[in-house]
């Protein structure tokens, strides 16, 4: 707690405010996704193994690919932050672009997955496992879309050269958000793809 | 030199560890253990992965304690909520 | 000055200054007017319900304007009665209590009390206000869609709420869920703002234990809200999908579990009552020292008790569900935690009483309301113990005893506490004093009629009078109690009509009131002692430095009996 309290002895910087605000936001996000995960786990326990036959039909391969994609995008955005810290504008811009491409790749794979499942007859109304599957991955997907908007805005600012007068710190806060989206997926992956 | 006052760990190596853990949990599914053991194991691995991302990528390791509390307290809370609801919802 | 903190320039256009303002003081007032406006609706609904209970299925005076099929010539059908109980609860908790105590008081006071020039994120602050305004519009619009407004109670229990076939309400309930989702979003934005502001923007010398207690209450409330609402948001999304897409998360025939909704709702619901409660108590904590001219008793004890109560509030939720068929194994633990949670609140109340003891009390209107809040809240708190112990609860559950209990906690907090706060801070907010005589008339009228409404409710509740029934005369065993119902209704009419005194005083004083000085109550905290009245854009002419705690009254050896936080002891008071 010492740093935050010490900060009040002089001007609070936008950096401290931004990071603090983002962490409080993430706390509420943890509770929301935590709520979903809790509900899923409890229902699955109550079902007494009846869901396994439904859970078999998700594509573990696609899920694995997406896990690798998202883990890698976490790496690239933290590299962008590191580059900004080291005043290396060029690689910061490049890492932002790679992150953006990986985020789109994630959504692409997800879209293929959804299309295959729906054409095979697995919709949100097929059974309660599939309801959970579509709601949880859908909500996570919306968070990815939100991340794309934010990272895209940072990338456009980087191209225009407006990312550098204090605003470059936003890469750190958006990065925190993006890592959180990654962590959610780290749990969704075994919950939905591995435990049949 | 960095202007945030903390060092940057070797992010690529951390990424390598994360991938390794991913493939360990994938492999565990094919080992001949009971479902209970396998599920427990892959969730422990997932928790470890999440901790690594939070500690290094989200630099909780270098943060003040207030930020750590902000991150940990909600996790504890929803775990408590889940455990409390097991007799009521989970074993219905 | 403009370089301190956010340093946004003072706006000049009307739209930027009064409508889409990013100044926390303007936003605080916007919240104030929104909450008072919504309170009129909540009160009107209470009047319709009370009339129906006293003289069932007769034409209600003043309800003739309600179009069909909501009412028929002033007579309300059961469906509309159910919508009234639902919307009365929803409006009073989420659209009056929270915007008044957190939105208005929190926004206006927190930056001033910590010496900051604005919130940490002024634009987010503006967005939070416009989000709850949208939510209010969505909620009011839900009356006019086909099938009428939500009628599953303010708790929206599944499966009643999960499938339109049970209530006949279609989009009305969907819009209700969406309005709540927007309201939650608004207060999440607000909470992030409050917490970041208090952590990062305190002026030099303002340590955590020199914060006025109101700030402590606001940040504890923000943390409680932020940590409890998430699972309910998850549940609300699932409920909306059940209703619109046709999933079955809360519908037993489709594999869902309706009981889970109750768990999710009350996991949020109990911390939520403290979210509303704490800022109201915070106002009392500011008012007591000013009008007793002595420090509040046990500052740190109050802070720690609040934190303990906040933490415990996450472990008591199932006391709302003792008769819902939950596992008997978890009934006893929840009974115990519920009884335990009264301990920190008892400590706080004793601190209040000790603060009053031996003080030279100035009986101004805010002080009267503060004392009134404490006295009525004690009744609410003590009757909570009955509800909290499972054996008694099984008897009184879903009776008017419960209705009386929670009105005895929330009414003193939101309205008596809110009035105390408004009479107290009105001079700072609007630069004028409110009329004291009218204020005292308002106090005595409101407190007496409030007790006349709700004390009889304990009696009929103990007599078995169920809550949420349309027509008590349908039950023979309730018929002997009908005279009490009629008495309650007349008292409620008196209570509501009495509020005209406040409305008149509020607007009359705003234009014709005596001009307020910078520090009319001779208070020590920064918003009174260091900021001009009304505070300019940016709040302070110079950044204050804080030298001591917030309640230094009657210090020996000082010229005046109050020592402002930003003036060093021994130096001449500014
Ligand atoms: Cu409760």
Image (tube, rainbow, N blue to C red):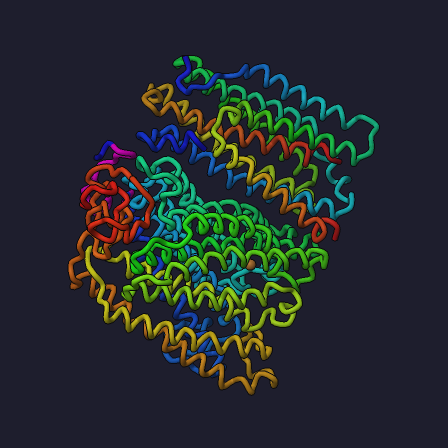
The quarter of the picture where the N terminus of chain C appears is: top left
Question: Which residue is found at the position 69% from the left and 26% from the top?
Answer: A61
Residue projecting furthest to the front: C557
Question: Which residue is found at the position 49% from the left and 81% from the top?
Answer: C485
| Depicted C161 relative to depicted C392: above or below | above
Prevalent SS, magenta region: loop
Q: Is residue C319 magenta?
A: no
Residue C253, horizontal then vertical, whole percent: 71, 56
Using the rendered view, name the quadrant where residue B15 is placed. Answer: top right
Q: Is residue C10 magenta?
A: yes
Q: Is residue A26 left or right of residue C524?
A: right
The quarter of the picture where the C terminus of chain C appears is: top left
Q: Is residue C252 left or right of residue C565?
A: right
Residue C477, horizontal then vertical, whole percent: 61, 84
Question: Which residue is found at the position 16% from the left and 62% from the top?
Answer: C514
Residue A31, horizontal then vertical, whole percent: 55, 42
Task: Count the labels in the image.
Answer: 0
Residue A172, horizontal then vertical, whole percent: 44, 25
Is A103 or C130 nearer to us in this picture?
C130
Question: Which residue is found at the position 61% from the left and 64% from the top?
Answer: C166
Is A6 or C104 nearer to us in this picture?
A6
| Depicted C526 relative to depicted C140: above or below | above
Using the rendered view, name the quadrant where residue A121 is placed. Answer: top right
Using the rendered view, name the quadrant where residue B76 is placed. Answer: top right
Tell me if I can see residue C100 in this picture: no
Q: Magenta stretch: give its range.
A: C4-22
Q: Is residue A98 left or right of residue C25?
A: right
């Amino acid at each position: 707690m010492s740093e935050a309290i010490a900060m009040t002895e002089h001007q609070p910087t936008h950096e401290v405010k931004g990071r603090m605000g983002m962490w409080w936001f993430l706390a509420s996000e943890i509770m929301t996704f935590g709520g979903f995960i809790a509900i899923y786990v409890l229902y699955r326990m109550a079902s007494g193994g009846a869901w396994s036959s439904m859970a078999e039909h998700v594509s573990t391969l696609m899920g694995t690919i997406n896990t690798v994609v998202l883990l890698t995008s976490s790496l690239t955005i933290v590299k962008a932050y590191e580059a900004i810290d080291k005043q290396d504008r060029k690689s910061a811009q490049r890492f932002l672009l790679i992150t953006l491409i990986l985020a789109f790749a994630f959504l692409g794979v997800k879209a293929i997955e959804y299309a295959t499942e729906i054409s095979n007859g697995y919709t949100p109304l097929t059974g309660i496992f599939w309801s959970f599957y579509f709601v949880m991955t859908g909500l996570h997907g919306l968070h990815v879309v939100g991340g794309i908007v934010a990272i895209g805005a940072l990338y456009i600012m980087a191209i225009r050269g407006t990312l550098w007068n204090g605003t470059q710190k936003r890469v750190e806060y958006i990065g925190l958000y993006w890592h959180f989206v990654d962590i959610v997926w780290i749990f969704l992956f075994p919950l939905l793809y591995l435990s049949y | 030199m960095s202007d945030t006052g903390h060092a940057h760990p070797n992010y690529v190596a951390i990424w390598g560890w994360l991938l390794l853990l991913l493939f360990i949990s994938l492999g565990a599914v094919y080992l001949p253990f009971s479902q209970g053991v396998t599920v427990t194991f892959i969730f422990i691995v997932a928790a470890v992965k999440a901790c690594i991302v939070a500690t290094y990528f989200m630099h909780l390791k270098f943060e003040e304690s207030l930020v750590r509390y902000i991150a940990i307290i909600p996790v504890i809370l929803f775990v408590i909520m889940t455990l409390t609801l097991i007799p009521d919802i989970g074993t219905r | 000055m403009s370089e301190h903190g956010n340093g946004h320039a003072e706006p000049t256009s009307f739209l930027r200054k009064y409508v889409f303002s990013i100044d926390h003081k303007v936003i605080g007032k916007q919240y104030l007017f929104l909450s008072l406006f919504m309170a009129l609706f909540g009160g009107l609904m209470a009047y319709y319900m009370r009339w129906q209970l006293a003289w069932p299925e007769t034409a209600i005076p003043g309800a003739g304007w309600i179009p069909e099929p909501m009412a028929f010539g002033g007579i309300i059908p059961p469906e509309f009665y159910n919508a009234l109980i639902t919307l009365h609860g929803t409006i009073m908790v989420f659209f009056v209590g929270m915007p008044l105590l957190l939105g208005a008081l929190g926004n206006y006071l927190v930056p001033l009390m910590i010496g900051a020039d604005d919130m940490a994120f002024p634009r987010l602050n503006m967005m939070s206000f416009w989000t709850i305004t949208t939510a209010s519009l969505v909620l009011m619009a839900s009356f006019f869609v086909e099938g009428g407004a939500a009628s599953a109670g303010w708790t929206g229990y599944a499966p009643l709420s999960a499938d339109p076939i049970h209530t006949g309400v279609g989009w009305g309930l969907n819009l209700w869920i969406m309005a709540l989702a927007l309201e939650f979003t608004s207060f999440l934005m607000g909470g992030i703002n409050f917490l970041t502001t208090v952590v990062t923007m305190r002026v030099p010398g303002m340590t955590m234990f020199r914060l006025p207690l109101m700030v402590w209450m606001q940040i504890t409330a923000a943390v409680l809200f932020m940590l409890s609402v998430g699972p309910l948001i998850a549940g609300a999304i699932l409920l909306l999908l059940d209703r619109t897409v046709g999933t079955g998360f809360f519908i037993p025939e489709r594999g869902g579990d309706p009981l889970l909704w109750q768990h999710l709702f009350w996991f949020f619901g109990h911390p939520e009552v403290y979210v509303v409660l704490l800022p109201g108590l915070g106002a009392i904590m500011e008012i007591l020292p000013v009008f007793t001219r002595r420090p509040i008793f046990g500052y740190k004890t109050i802070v720690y008790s609040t934190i303990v109560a906040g933490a415990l509030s996450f472990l008591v939720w199932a006391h709302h569900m003792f008769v819902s068929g939950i596992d008997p194994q978890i009934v006893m633990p929840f009974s115990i935690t519920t009884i335990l949670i009264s301990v920190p609140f008892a400590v706080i109340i004793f601190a209040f009483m000790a603060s009053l003891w031996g003080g030279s009390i100035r009986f101004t209107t805010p002080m009267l309301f503060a004392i009134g809040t404490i006295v009525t809240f004690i009744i609410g708190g003590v009757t909570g113990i009955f509800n909290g112990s499972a054996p008694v609860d099984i008897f009184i559950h879903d009776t008017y005893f419960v209705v009386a209990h929670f009105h005895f906690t929330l009414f003193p907090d939101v309205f008596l506490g809110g009035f105390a706060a408004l009479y107290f801070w009105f001079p700072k907010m609007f630069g004028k004093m409110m009329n004291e005589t009218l204020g005292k008339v308002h106090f005595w009228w409101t407190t007496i009629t409030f007790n006349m409404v709700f004390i009889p409710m304990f009696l009929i509740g103990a007599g078995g009078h169920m809550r949420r029934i349309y027509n008590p005369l349908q039950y023979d065993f309730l018929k002997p109690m009908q005279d009490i119902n009629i008495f309650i209704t007349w008292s409620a009419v008196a209570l509501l009509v009495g509020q005209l005194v406040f409305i008149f005083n509020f607007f009359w004083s705003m234009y014709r009131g005596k001009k307020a000085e910078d520090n009319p109550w001779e208070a020590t905290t920064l918003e009174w002692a260091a900021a001009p009245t009304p505070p300019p854009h940016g709040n302070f002419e110079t950044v204050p430095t804080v030298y001591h705690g917030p309640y230094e009254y009657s210090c020996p050896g000082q010229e005046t009996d109050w020592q402002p936080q930003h003036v060093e002891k021994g130096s001449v008071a500014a």
